[in-house]
Structure formats: C-alpha cells, structure tokens
Image (cartoon, coloured by chain):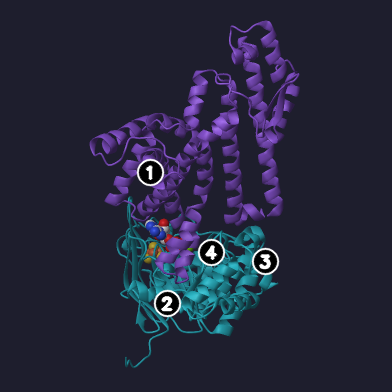
Chain colours: A purple, B cyan
Amino acid sequence: MVAYLIRRIFNAVLTLLVVTLVTFGIFFMVPKLTGSDPALLYIGKTADKVALDGIREKMGLADPIMVQYGKFLKGLVAGRDYANGPDVTHCPAPCLGYSFKTEQEVTPLLMDDLPVTFSLALGAAILWLIGGVATGVISALRKGSLLDRVVMTGALAGVSLPIYFTGLLASAVFVYWLGWLPQGQYVPFLESPADWFVQLLLPWITLAFLFAATYARLTRANMLETLGEDYIRTARAKGLPERTVIGKHALRSGLTPIVTIFGLDLGSLLGGAILTEAVFNLRGLGYQALQAIKGNDLPVILGVTLIAATFIVVANLVVDLVYGLIDPRVRLG
Amino acid sequence: MSSVTPRPYLEVKDLTVRFETDDGVVQAVSGSSFSLEAGKTLGIVGESGSGKSVTSLAVLGLHRTRSNAKVTGQIWLDDQELVTASNEEVRALRGGKMSMIFQDPLSAMHPYFTVGAQIVEAYRIHHPGVNKKVARERAIDMLARVGIPQPSRRFNDYAHQFSGGMRQRAMIAMALVNDPKLLIADEPTTALDVTVQAQILDLIRDLQAEFGSAVIMITHDLGVVAELADDVLVMYGGKVIEQGPAIDLFQRPQHPYTWGLLGSMPRMDREVRDRLTPVKGSPPSLINLPSGCAFHPRCPYAGRNGDRSFTDIPVLTGGAHSVACHMSAEERTKIFQEEVAPNL
Ligand SMILES: Nc1ncnc2c1ncn2[C@@H]1O[C@H](COP(=O)(O)OP(=O)(O)O)[C@@H](O)[C@H]1O
Ligand code: SF4
Ligand SMILES: [Mg+2]
C-alpha cells in the first residue's frame, strides 16, 4: 500500500508539472503566433519604446522560453521578484503573474473567487452523490415499479437537459413564481452560514441535477448487476437477513465504481460551474475565466487553467487512493 | 407429532419449480421426490440444465427472492415443512441446519471482504451472542480443519489471493462453520483441476464422517457419485427419470439415459481418447419439453413400444430402484446385458 501511495503521488506531481509546461507553452506561444506583444498588452498602445523595453525587462519577456518557464515555476513554488534595475515588485508564492487588464496579481484575484466556486462545487457534489445514489438504489430494489419508471424518466431528462435550461427553469419556478428562494448574491459562509446556504441552494440543485441523473442511472445498473452475482446468493445462503445482503454485501460492490466516476466528475465539475455561475450570476472562478477569455487576459486564463488542472489531478489522486483502500484487488494486485 | 415411522431427515415431495420468463414458462423441476437420512449421501446427476441447481436452491428457499419463481410441493427438513414456512423461518435455517457449497468459489465469495470476515459473519449470524474474538478463533479453527495451511494468516486474505482448491476449502469451511445437518454441494469440483478435485471430494467425505451430516452431492460426473453416494437421483429435463441405491444403479442401470451417462464416464482401463462418449444430441428446452418421454429425441429405443414414447409421459415405477421408461423391466434388462454392458 505504501509503494502504491508513493507511486500515485509521484504520478500526480509529474502530471501537474506537464500541465504547467503545456499551459505555459501555450501562453508563451499565443502572443508569438498572433503577433501581439505581451508588453503592449500590459501597458497599452500609447506607451513609448522606453516604457515598453522597461516592462519587457521587468517581466522577463525577452528571455528564452525555458528561462521564462523556470522563473514561472520558481514563482509558483517560492515566489519571485520582477525587477528592472531599482524598480522591484515582489510577487509571493504561488505567483501566477499579473493580469494584462487590471495589472493586479493573479493569485489573490483568483483566491477571492475560489470560495464561491468551491462552495458551489462541494454542495452540488454532496447533493448529487447522496441524491443520485439513493434514487438509484431504490430504483434497483423496486425494478419495474411505477416509482422506478418515474425516477428513470426524470433521470433521462436530467442527463439530456442543459444547465442553462434547468437553471433558468428552476429560477423561474422557485424565485419568480413560487417566491420560495431569493434571487440574490453570494454570501460568504463565515458572514452568514444560513444566507450562504439559501443563496446557493438553487445553483446547487441545478448543477447537482445534471450529475445526479447520471448517478441514479449508474447506481441502478450497478446494483442490478451486483444483485445477480453469485456472492449475493452466497450471502443469502449463509442466512443473512435481506437488509444485510443489500445494505452490506450488495452496496459494497454496487457503489465501488461510483467512486471512480465521482472523482472524474469532481474534476470536470468546473465546466458545469462556469455555466451555473453564469446563469445565477455568481462571481466565481467560472465567471472570472469567462471574463478573462473575453478580454484575452492570458495570465488569468493560465491561472484558472492551472487551478482547474490541480483540482482534477488532486481529485483523481484522492480517488485512486480511496479505490486502493476499498478494492483489495487493486491494492494487492 | 406422533407418526409411526419417523420421517427421514430430509424429505422432498412432488417438488415443482417454475420460472416465468419473457420467452415463456421454464419448467425447471417437475414433481421430483426424494429423501435423505442423516449421515447419508444422495447423488444428483444429470447434464447441465437438467434442474439440479434449481432443486438444491429450492431446498434452501433461495428462490424466494426471485419474483418470477414459483415453488410447489413439500420440503420436510427435520419435521419442519419449508415450502409453506415464513421467510424468516427459512432464513434462520439457511447456513445453520442446512448449508451449501457452490460450484465456482471465486464468484461465490465476496471480492471486497476477507475470507475470514465472511466466515465470521456466517458464524455470528447463527450465534448472535458470540463476540468477535471467539468467532475469529472458530473461523481459524475451521480453516485449519479443511486443510488450509497457516490459517490465522490466510484468515486476512481475500478470495482472489487463494488458489482454486484452497478457495473451495475455505468455502467448505464457511458452509460447515455452524455444524449443518444437511450440506448441499453443487458441483463442488467442476471448476477445479483434476488432482484438486480428488482432494476436495476426500475432504467432503472425511468431514461428513466427522460431522455426521447428510450430504446432497450434485454433479454431472457419475464417477463422483460412484465414489461418494449411498443413493442416486438421475435427472433429465427437470424430472427424476431413475433413482435408487447407488449399488443397484451402477450394477443394473435401467434407463437408456443413465446408460448414456455411464458410457460417458471416464474409466481407468481405457485410452484417454476413448473415455468420453457423451450422450448424443442436446438437452431439451425446459420451456417446450418434447412430448411423451422427454428423452425420446435422443433415445435409440424410442420406437420399441409403438408410439407411447412420443405421446405418453412415462411415470416412475416406484420401489427402491425406480425408473421412468415405457420399456418393460425384462426388455430393459435384456438390452442392458446384451447391448450396453459389453461396451461399458
Ligand atoms: N432464475 C431463473 N429464471 C429462469 N430460468 C432459470 C432460472 N434459474 C434456472 N433457470 C433454468 O432452469 C433450468 C435448470 O437450471 P439448473 O438447475 O441450474 O441446471 P443444472 O442441472 O445445470 O444445475 C435451466 O434451463 C435454467 O436456464
Ligand atoms: S420411454 Fe421410450 S424414449 Fe423414453 S427412455 Fe424409455 S424407451 Fe427411451
Ligand atoms: Mg447447476
């Protein structure tokens, strides 16, 4: 298990390194290919040659790509100083550079948005995991019943409807028509947990619905397959009561594949989060990414990409480790 | 209850099991009756699909969780009727008084629980007051008794870490952990290497002697039956077509299907390639059984008594050695002695 652990962590770090290399490469290549000058993007078209050279020197834009990449990595790990003679700006770790648009440091900019996206993602994930798995199990146990058919039809709708549709529909019904929920702003958890919860409820449900539908279908299929296994018959032949047969023996294997899918989905959650943040006007990472793409703000795009990649890699790492814990066949080879 | 002759430990009367499927009703077992005394072994033989497993699962009441299954008839275990008993009553007997060993021990063991934990679970469900430590000792003791080396270390292993033979031993340990009075072994050696097969059969025989339980040995291999069984039941197309004491059945087999099975039995005095001549033709569909005698499409003697084999279902003759065939006893004896026996 320790060897497995070390191998997985090593792989994860390696993956992240490759991701920084590729994204940084793109970041470096895009201005070259489009013929735009990053220095110009920083200080605008009106600047004179001296100012442009100064910014090139300070940002290290004239260095060869590997040197720039090296400095970028160092900035990530240890922070870096941008210097042009006596003009020194310190950027603490993890340094992601400066926004073209606002000239703000990227890291604090994104850190401000992170809690919004994190709250959205975490709440939605918990909601869909519990909701999807529970409905899937119930459907499997009542296969062919009216309940099963209703739930599975709903799940089909959930899988096929896009977020902006379900999101707007949910807003229309719960906010404007029934008036049960406020249409408002994100409230930080520490400010007021209750408001945080109420404000996020609808985005959660919208985002979770998309995933929960998949989980319900998947769980149902897994459970039905597991219930037909020989070892379930053995569990019954031992004289175990039905609740142990289902609740322990069947769930144990029926839910194991869900863990893998959950990890993958956690990673790709950001895509759904961007749309959800747009629909509900939440200013999170997704919103920030959208603005950056519109404004061609490469350092911010780079930052968001790295955060998203880190999120995916870490989620996968956690899943691999959890999987090693729950499936002895993986752990012991 | 005050009956004059005590009931045998297990008595099955007119057992019928049907499955409703999309393709039609599967008549998996039709009216089979048999009985078994404590300490004795009953062999059930027949080709794959003849209803052997369905019969044994019916005894354990394992068709109850299938909504498409219908079981009728009577199953008496130690003077308790099981077909009409409640789910809870039957559950309490499963794994306790009666238990079962399955064909493929890899798929029959849970992949995510250790072998030891699964044995402990089987023990504790029938001994609710026993603490984990005692149950663990009991499980390790059972692993040792079925011949698993280093049992306290293997206790923590998973099924996939065992070899096929060791896995089946562990399965047997689990089945015997509560001292069952009836043990059903459903093709316990089919998935194993030939050398391991013999070891497992020896083990079952030794344990039966030690525990004194009644054993139902299900197999498609008459060799296994010849070695272990006191009585034999031959099934074809969901019906019992011949039954009797093993000695009679092997010395004077009466049914043309049994002759076929005997002909397909491996024998030491024959060349390997001559050994196996399986019964020609294929097993019948249980949704649409052939008319008359279900064996008639494959029976070389089907036309002997006019059309009866094609139109009338033969009934068991009854008695200690019973057979369901339209031919007369004399005719069968003559054919066996003149045509069949010399070629066996
Ligand atoms: N749950 C079920 N639903 C429908 N048909 C079944 C079911 N279980 C067994 N059968 C059918 O019953 C017949 C007898 O099966 P089985 O008792 O397993 O044969 P075997 O003698 O090889 O053990 C087979 O044709 C099988 O397809
Ligand atoms: S009844 Fe007829 S077909 Fe059936 S086994 Fe006897 S001879 Fe053959
Ligand atoms: Mg079978």
- Local crowd size for mark 2, using a 10 Å CA cut-off: few (<14), some (14–19), many (≥20): many
Q: Amino acid at mark 1?
A: Asp
**Pointer 4 chain:** B
Report the Cα–Cα distance between label 1 and label 2. 56 Å
Q: Pick the residue in front: B325 or B214.
A: B214
Q: Element type at marker 3? A: helix
Report the Cα–Cα distance between label 3 and label 4. 16 Å
Mark 1 = which residue?
A: A195
Contact between marks 3 and 4 (CB within 8 A): the answer is no
Q: For the image shown, how many numbered marks are present on the structure?
A: 4
* Mark sitting on residue B103: 4
**Pointer 3 chain:** B
* Mark sitting on residue B93: 2
When the figure is inspected, residue A314 is found, relative to residue A88, above or below; the finding is below
Nearer to us: label 3 or label 4: 4
Q: Pick the residue in front: B71 or A66.
A: A66
Q: Earlier in the sequence, mark 3 or mark 4?
A: 4
Work out whether residue B315 can be spotted. Answer: no
Left or right? Give the position of B136 relative to A142: right
Mark 3 = which residue?
A: B195
Residue at image position (49%, 56%) is: B280
Q: Element type at marker 1? A: helix
Q: Earlier in the sequence, mark 3 or mark 2?
A: 2
Answer with the quadrant where ligand 2 appears in the image.
bottom left
Q: What is the quadrant of the N terminus of chain B in the image?
A: bottom left
Nearer to us: label 1 or label 2: 1
